Amino acid sequence: MDLMQALKQRYTTKAYDAEKRIPEDVVAKLKDALRLSPSSINSQPWHFLIADTAEGKARIAKSAHGGFAYNAPKITDASHVFVLCARTKLTPEYVDVVLDQEQADGRFASGAEREGREKSCKGYVALHEQLGNTAAWAQNQTYISLGFLLLAAGELGIDATPIEGFDKAVLTEEFKLAGQDLAPAVVVSLGYHAETDFNAGLPKSRLPESAVFSSI
Ligand SMILES: Cc1cc2nc3c(=O)[nH]c(=O)nc-3n(C[C@H](O)[C@H](O)[C@H](O)COP(=O)(O)O)c2cc1C
């Protein structure tokens, strides 16, 4: 699908056809979209939980309770549900893991190049530590991956629902995320919309260009 067409056609699905499943080769592309997302200093400060069984989706749906209950069927009826988690800490050891990967991928022509990059990356990590916003910084990067996932889904003809309406404490406990230095950022349901999806036929609504752009 053409990029502009995908941007215009994708929309937030409100009801899923529980019988339809995303083929595995398409799921692989959705995973690629997440993994290939850009992030500050290539920190990739995320981890993604993927549920494609009724049991896995039910565990995620536990977090859609109380005022969030309206989101539960979007989780249980979707084909796949991704939980986008952000790191709460970026340790020097973690930065070394990223640098090791960059080295293995052939990004450094010399030891000096790696050293320079290490200094720069650890400088940014230290800066955010000092500012006390490491977790928020990591969450910002994770939301970029949300954008990539939603766009990829649109392009692949997969319906999607980004969901912030869930109880983060419940998911943190259910998947023991705190002990892994992770925090849930956003849940994304993916699949195929049901006939009953009231949002499928509604026009897209956005503020006009004049409200969101200024030429300077
Ligand atoms: C970060 C984020 C969180 C959202 N959370 C929910 C949610 O909990 N439940 C829901 O039905 N829609 C949710 N939405 C969907 C938005 O309401 C929707 O994206 C917006 O109205 C624009 O419409 P469109 O996605 O159909 O273009 C969320 C969207 C984003 C980007």
Image: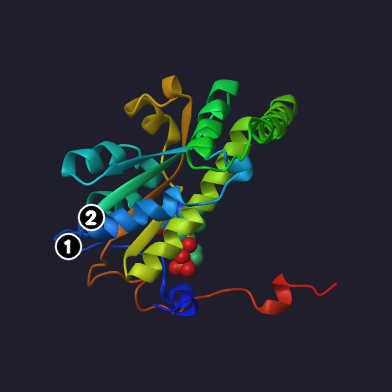
Q: Quadrant of residue 213?
A: bottom right
Q: Quadrant of residue 65?
A: top left
How is this picture coloured?
Answer: rainbow
Instruction: Quarter of the image for the C terminus: give it.
Output: bottom right
Instruction: Name the spot of residue 96 as percent of width and height, x first.
Output: 56, 26
Does the residue at mark 1 contact the one at mark 2 (Cβ under 8 Å)?
yes
Instruction: Name the spot of residue 7 as percent of width and height, x first.
Output: 48, 73
165 or 94: nearer the viewer: 94
Residue 79's label in the rendered image is 2
27 or 112: nearer the viewer: 112
Relative to 181, is 162 above or below?
below
- Residue drawn at (38%, 31%) of the image: 170
Relative to 48, is 203 above or below?
below
**Mark 2 beta carbon near ligand 1 (under 8 Å):** no
* Label 1, label 2: how far apart the Cα atoms are: 7 Å
Location of mark 1 (residue)? 20
- Residue drawn at (20%, 63%) of the image: 17
Q: From where the camera sits, is residue 57 visible? A: yes
Which kind of residue does numbered mark 2 sit on? Ser
Which kind of residue does numbered mark 1 sit on? Lys
